Amino acid sequence: MPTILSHPAVPLAIGFGLGSRAISGRLLLAGVAASMAPDLDVYISHYWSAIAHRGITHTPLAALFGALCAALIARALRTTHVKAFLFVFVCLLSHPLLDMCTNGGSGIPLLWPLDDERYFFPWTPIEVSPLGIRRFFSERGLEVLTSEIVWVWVPALVLYATLRRSRHSREGGNPF
């Protein structure tokens, strides 16, 4: 999996790229939390064996459920129901899609509950993160972070710049 440090790259790029008029601060925070939430299964699996890492919390169905919950609390997020649903859905779904780009671990049950098969993308350039804090603070952790800068953060910065430029060209202002 990409680290907990890199999953927020997608909501941050979209949120800052679209700006605070489109994505409220509260909705952005919800999106960042949503992008990291599927990995809570690592902790849940210690207590409930039916939940495995990269299991049902990493599915489009879970993203749909989370997005529906966000739509229900849209007022608290200072946004519309549609924006809350769409933004949180994209943020939640970005997590398993990034995990499918890693070169290790178990795949993602993308079609669950229709199919239990676990999938990776054909191209897996992101180094899989070691589980555990000790293993992360090692040479391996540095390799992972370097990989994430190249394959997650640089594309996220490109997405941010593209959205910002597009927003400012529509508004007639300077994007930078």
Image (cartoon, grey):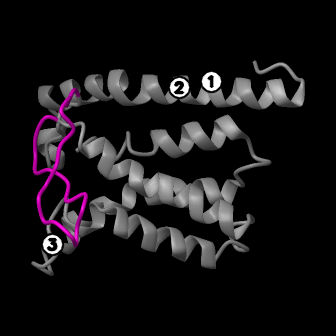
Judge whether 94 appears above or below 27 on screen. Answer: above
Q: Of marks 3 and 1, which one's residue comes earlier in the chain?
A: 3
Tell me where residue 92 appears, x and y as whole percent.
43, 57
Q: Secondary structure at mark 3?
A: loop
The residue beneath circle 3 is 45
Q: Quick one: label 2 or label 3, which is nearer the N terminus? A: 3
**Residue type pointed to by label 1:** Ala
Q: Residues within 10 Å of mark 3 (few under 14, many from 20)?
A: some
Alpha carbon distance from label 2 to label 3: 34 Å
User: Quick one: which residue is furthest to the front in this view?
Assistant: 114
Q: Which mark is residue 157?
A: 2
Comparing 30 with 169, the one in front is 169
Amino acid carrying label 3: it is Ser
Q: Is residue 3 visible?
A: no
Instruction: Locate residue 163 relative to residue 140 in the image: left or right.
Output: right
State the SS at label 1. Answer: helix
Q: Nearer the viewer, mark 2 or mark 3?
A: 2
The residue segment tinted magenta is 103-125
- Camera-side mark, 3 or 1: 1
Q: Residues within 10 Å of mark 1 (few under 14, many from 20)?
A: some
**Horizontal and vertical percent position of residue 127:** 18, 31
Task: Residue type at mark 2: give it.
Answer: Leu
Q: Where is residue 157? Give x, y as percent.
A: 53, 25
Residue 65 highlighted magenta (yes or no): no
Measure the alpha-carbon separation of dots 3 and 1.
Answer: 38 Å
Image quadrant where residue 57 sits: bottom left
Residue linked to disc 1: 161
Q: Where 65 sits versus 149, above or below?
A: below
Is residue 85 among the parts visible in the rendering? yes
Residue sitting at x 58%, y 58% = 86
Assess whether mark 2 and mark 1 are in contact (beta carbons under 8 angstroms). Answer: yes
